Image: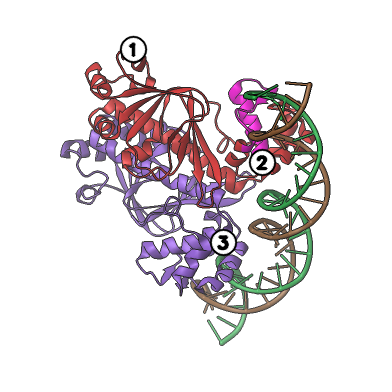
Chain colours: A red, B purple, C brown, D green
Amino acid sequence: MLDAITTVSEAEVLPILAGMSAARRQDLLANAILHSVPTGTVLFEQGEVPNFQLIIVSGSAQLLGKSGAGREVLIETVRAPDLIIPAAVVSGAPYLMQARVPEPSRFLLVQADVFRDAAAADPVLAQAVIGSLATQFRRMVRQIKNLKLRTTTERVGCYVLALSARQGTPDRAVLPYEKTLIASELGMTRESFSRTLASLENSGLQVEGQTILIRDARSLAAACHPDPLIDDSPL
Amino acid sequence: MLDAITTVSEAEVLPILAGMSAARRQDLLANAILHSVPTGTVLFEQGEVPNFQLIIVSGSAQLLGKSGAGREVLIETVRAPDLIIPAAVVSGAPYLMQARVPEPSRFLLVQADVFRDAAAADPVLAQAVIGSLATQFRRMVRQIKNLKLRTTTERVGCYVLALSARQGTPDRAVLPYEKTLIASELGMTRESFSRTLASLENSGLQVEGQTILIRDARSLAAACHPDPLIDDSPL
DNA sequence: TCGGCAGCTTGATATAGGTCAATTCATGAC
DNA sequence: GTCATGAATTGACCTATATCAAGCTGCCGA
């Protein structure tokens, strides 16, 4: 499960580390570890202080927020290639979210202080960190606008539209994980999500298990008011 | 209103630029502009592409999100010394929020491309940008947890508690701006905010215009479940 | 093949919070 | 001082969404 990196060939192609001088990258990877984890693994809990910067080599990680009462909501999904919450690592502050692995994935673990030092010393790595942080920040802002400015119907409809755009299939969208999780991501209960999806069948949408058919994108858009400054850009 | 910087004395003390070599800082400031603006000024609209990186020298800026329907909510307040949405500037993407000035303030305007180049070239500036982005990201995460995991009562109560902690007065909190704005920041209507505050009078709280007296912090905390991983740390 | 979960849907009901409207309060202009 | 304006409160009402409670469906393991 824990493998020291013998060949850096894999890590070399990581876009995050691209552009770093070979020497610097060598330095970074000296005591890095490549970790392959199965579905369901918890990478860290909220409240923990980061020991490592995790770099997603393949797969993805879900970031969950938990309340004192035990309620648990999905906040974000991060996909390869990216860093997992560099904000916590660079600030050395406790994680605000738990990280869980929804599919077999591989991560590169870099000691937190090593990572910080490297980011301070290497402008190319610093740029990568800045880029990752900026993108993640903007996603959070979009989500806040989504929550504060929209009804559940709008959130659900726009979620489906954004999904179909991201998947390159204008006539359908396949839900990437359980509806219960998606509901929590959208800030509603699973029951509301189910009902809202059903009610959108009047607006050119058809639910078929995990796949949602979009029979009339025009009508759907009219019902849920997509907005490029809220919905994830297809980038 | 627009003044070229003749003396850099002011900018020199800006913590953001501290640590940069004098030469580099000089370079940055060469075509920077110091801008003093009155209350109410809109610095930029959402949707605009950033021309400048704005650095808050004194005062603050409010970041608002607007819906197509014209609804407008407060998302964040940024205070000196800090950068205004570096995420938009470094990524060169359109602003997701409008920036408005709630008090007479001064900003240093650095051409966006100049700022990007400087951040790429100067590790110290890069670190400052990383720090600012990380802090701002974490604030957004806290806000999302606040919105998704809490009731209005909890949000209002914890807001007051956090305020009083930040202001160093355990027995009171002074609301920093209109209640309508605060309500939108907390994701509710002004009416709900008003009623919720009133209802918390049963939990050791007393409303006195813009100042809220905390007569029984224990009881208030019991009613609203503060959580260090959600509420702004007193840092 | 048969449980037996886990996830989902659906229905009935409750309620938190939104909407609309009227009133008070505070502030600043004149 | 009075008036006008915008903010805040309060009340009555309503609806969107949560909650609670069955069923349903598909899947996995024995």
What chain is tagged by disc 1?
A
Q: Mark 1 vs mark 3: same chain? A: no
Q: Give the range drawn in magenta.
A: A155-180
Q: Nearer the viewer, residue C3 or A170?
A: C3
Q: Mark 3 points at which residue?
A: B153
Q: Name the residue under label 1.
A: A9
Q: Which amino acid does label 2 sit on?
A: Arg
- Residue A117 in the image: above or below residue B40: above
Among numbered discs 2 and 1, the one appearing first in the sequence: 1
Image side of residue B86 versus residue C28, left or right: left
Image side of residue A189 versus residue A19, left or right: right
Mark 1 and mark 3 residues within 8 Å of each other at the beta carbon: no
How far from the left and from the top, in percent, is residue A126?
30, 30
Q: Residue at x 53, y 48 (%)?
A: A70
Q: Residue at x 38, y 59 (%)?
A: B104
Q: What residue type is labelled 3?
A: Thr
Q: Mark 2 vs mark 1: same chain? A: yes
* Mark 2: few/some/many CA within 10 Å (<14, 14-19, 20+): some
Question: Is residue A88 at all visible to an observer of this figure?
Answer: yes
Q: Which amino acid does label 1 sit on?
A: Ser
Q: Residue at x 77, y 30 (%)?
A: A204
How far from the left and from the top, in percent, is residue B103?
41, 60
- Classify mark 2: helix, strand or loop: helix
User: Which quadrant holds the N terminus of chain A?
Assistant: top left
In the drawing, what numbered circle is on residue A190? Answer: 2
